[in-house]
Amino acid sequence: MVLQSEIVSNWADGKRLAFVGDGDAISVCVAYLKHRGIVDYGPSKITVFDFDERVVKAVKRFADKERLENLDAQLYNCLDSFPDTSKFDCFYTNPPWGASNNGESVNIFVQRGIEAVAYEGDGMIVIADDDELAWPKQVLASVQKYASERNFFVSRMMPKLHQYHLDDNPELLSCNLVVTSVPGAEVPIFPSEAITDVTRLENFYGRSNSPRVRYVRERKRVDYGRAHDDEYEYELLEKMP
């Protein structure tokens, strides 16, 4: 995480950075490294968009405690239209890896990232990259094709950089895939809309595991230093037509 945070800090130095989801808390690490003077570079603004209210409020509490004025978070589900906020310069996402839907779940997060930068900027995507398996290559091809159709090209790739120790695949490797908008390209910018196409949502979180939860809500507690089984509850999505 320290290595990844330093990479992101350098890559997004002086820029407005949107995190489309951040279960790994890289946003907090990036902001904290610069604030403490461990590195002398980093984004000028960081906003986390996540559907887990526990993540959002934890980021806000940490930013308040450490006086990190450039760090903020907003409750958001990537299936909803992207909020009308100020334009970002770059986006970062570590999405569901799309092993069971040919990368469509990755593409949805990338779509929101591209909307966050208004089709002009850079994005860093954490994505599976493993020579021992076929599906990571298929997903990489799908995501690169999706980005290319929106006039983004692969400007950098850091192969096999991470190992996540997932329960179902403890040896799986991943990379940083960096995409950049083509300078001067005319890209039709469509208004951000909610995603309701059920074919895009099939196997979103794995085989036979489509989205059901709109938000993970935090239950108010006095002691936030310890985890309890009753610290959260689900707010479900409405059924698709």
Image: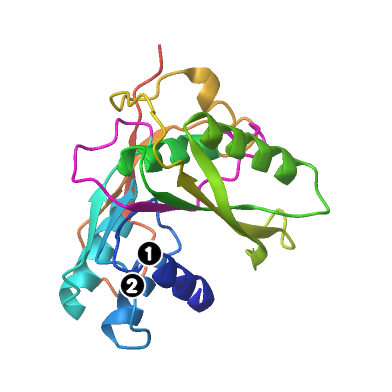
Query: Mark 1 sits on what residue?
Result: 12
Label 1: element kind: loop
Q: Amino acid at mark 1?
A: Ala
Q: Relative to 111, does residue 174 appear above or below in the rendering?
A: below
Which amino acid is tagged 2?
Gly
Gap between marks 1 and 2 measured at Cα: 6 Å
Q: Residue at x 39, y 40 (%)?
A: 114
Question: Whole-percent x and y of residue 151?
Answer: 48, 34
- Residue named by callout 2: 42
Label 1: how many Cα within 10 Å (few below 14, some 14–19, many 20+): many
**Relative to 88, is 214 above or below?**
above
x then y, percent, for residue 233: 33, 46
Q: Residue at x 71, y 45 (%)?
A: 136
Residue 70 placed where, x, y %? 20, 67
Residue most extreme to the bottom: 37
Magenta region's main secondary structure? loop
Q: Is residue 59 left or right of residue 100?
A: left
